[in-house]
Image: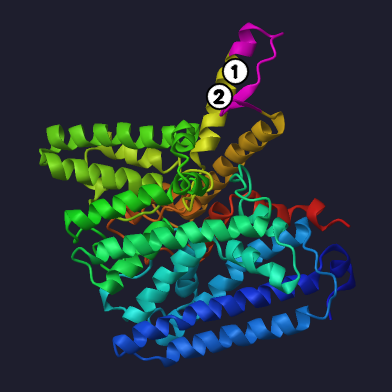
Amino acid sequence: MSNPKITKILNVWILMKVMGVLLLILAGFMLTSLIVSIYYHEPVLPIIYSAVITALFGGILLFFGNKNSNKNIGKREGYMIVTLTWVIISVFGALPFIISGAIPSFTNAFFETMSGFTTTGSSILTDIESVPKNILYWRAMTHWIGGMGIIVLTVAILPFLGIGGMQLLIAEMPGIAPDKLHPRITATAKRFWGIYVILTVVEILLLWAGEMNLFDAVCHSFATMATGGFSTKNDSIAGFLPYSQYIIILFMTLAGTNFTLHYFAFHGQIKKVFKNDEFKTYLSIIAVVTVILTFGLIIIVNTGVEKAFRDSLFTVVSILTTTGFVTADYIVWPVFLWVFVAALMFIGGSAGSTGGGVKIIRHLLLIKNSWIELKRTIHPAAIIPVKYGGKSISQQVIFNVMAFFLIYSLIFSFGVIAMALLGLDFETSVGASIASLGNIGPGIGGVGPVENYAFIPPFGKWILSFLMLLGRLELFTVLIIFSPAFWRN
């Protein structure tokens, strides 16, 4: 039986019911790996066992969750469901890795799975191409599920269970939330997933039309649209032809764009897209940094013009959108150049995209507010609001953004110190922390673009997994659960 004190604060039964549904959905996604198993004549039992265990636990939770007639999800339940979801699906999502023997260690399997679902792309695998294809497919699938968020998918089907899902979407997309595309939250969730699926299918077809086989096209499309970065190759995207690299650049850019803008574009409202301040800033950052890196590689490194441009553009888009695919080892570039890449790690993609990081809109609001504070210093009596998109932004939103930056900096510092205490050098500690918190994947130092996370001590992998979770859910959704006020009746 549940603790009476807890049930007064939380609707435990609704938690169980929703978690049961999520695990059943997860089991269904797992079973799609059987197609790959059968086609490549690989063992099917690891996938079947994993799916059965996941579905069994999901069914038990759903059975007991149905005992309660109260079907409302409040704010507390929303935050708890979202946070617990990313932890629990990472535990069950690790089963195919463990049962197949591809990653026998639970710590390593959990790290790889959390990295997948949070679309971070950090890996402990040292020889990716030796891993069975059905497991690589599942690894890519964890990206695709986590990219748009299994929560958003569930919000679209919860009404069929008689459960409202508004609080789930609020908890899944905290901070600067994307515009609602439809008065009903479920319709918004369905539209997001519809756009996500369409873009994924188009990318698969375009990559398949090049030198990639269908398996590689599917896995890389899943990773691209989720801004995840898991590849099926040891050298990531570097071994593919320029055609494939340019296709992936295009779709990484689209994945890092607010999905509300995709909706407007699909409906012919192109002016709304290019009037968006965040989108204009996003494209400007890509253009400016790409030009700097391109000229730097041509002049300093003596790289050919087209390759310098392609490697620069790919690296900028990959890091800014927090995808983490690699075509060049930017760590071996002159320091003047790779510091620009490191700076991009602290920016992130657009709000309402599958990208991670701080998000460009928060940087814009912080800069605007700082500029206005300078004006207020000169004119103390002046009332000057912060404006974005022609509208005044409330002080509450500005305070939220400032608090986010402060907490983000503190958590990043904690990560660096923790990694250093575990024996990592300073550069690697910084790289691992920002790459995990920003959901980027490759960092700097020992976790650079051609390295992996296999050498990180087990406790360090748990710390980095927690940073991935914090970054994916944008801090507050997770941290609020540790607040005493959250547990007061």
Q: Is residue 461 magenta?
A: no
Are the residues at dot 1 and dot 2 in contact (C-beta closer than 8 Å)? Answer: yes
Q: Is residue 395 left or right of residue 409?
A: right
Q: Residue at x 70, y 72 (%)?
A: 160
Q: Is residue 225 above or below residue 454?
A: above
Alpha carbon separation for disc pair 1 and 2? 6 Å
Q: Is residue 325 left or right of residue 304?
A: right
The answer to which image quadrant residue 159 occupies is bottom right
Q: Is residue 231 above or below residue 326?
A: below
Q: Which residue is mark 2?
A: 368
> So how many labels did they put on this image?
2
Range drawn in magenta: 375-392
Q: Is residue 3 left or right of residue 173?
A: right
Q: Is residue 487 above or below residue 125?
A: above
Q: Is residue 427 left or right of residue 58?
A: left
Inspect this view and state whether residue 128 appears.
no
Q: Which mark is residue 372?
A: 1
Residue 120 x, y percent position in the rendering: 44, 58
Residue 192 x, y percent position in the rendering: 53, 56
Q: Residue at x 29, y 40 (%)?
A: 338
* Circle 2: element type: helix
* Quadrant of the snapshot with the N terminus: bottom right
* Quadrant of the snapshot with the C terminus: bottom right
Amino acid beneath label 2? Lys
Amino acid beneath label 1? Ile
* Circle 1: element type: helix
Along the line of sight, the residue nearer the viewer: 147 or 483: 147
Residue 175 x, y percent position in the rendering: 63, 44
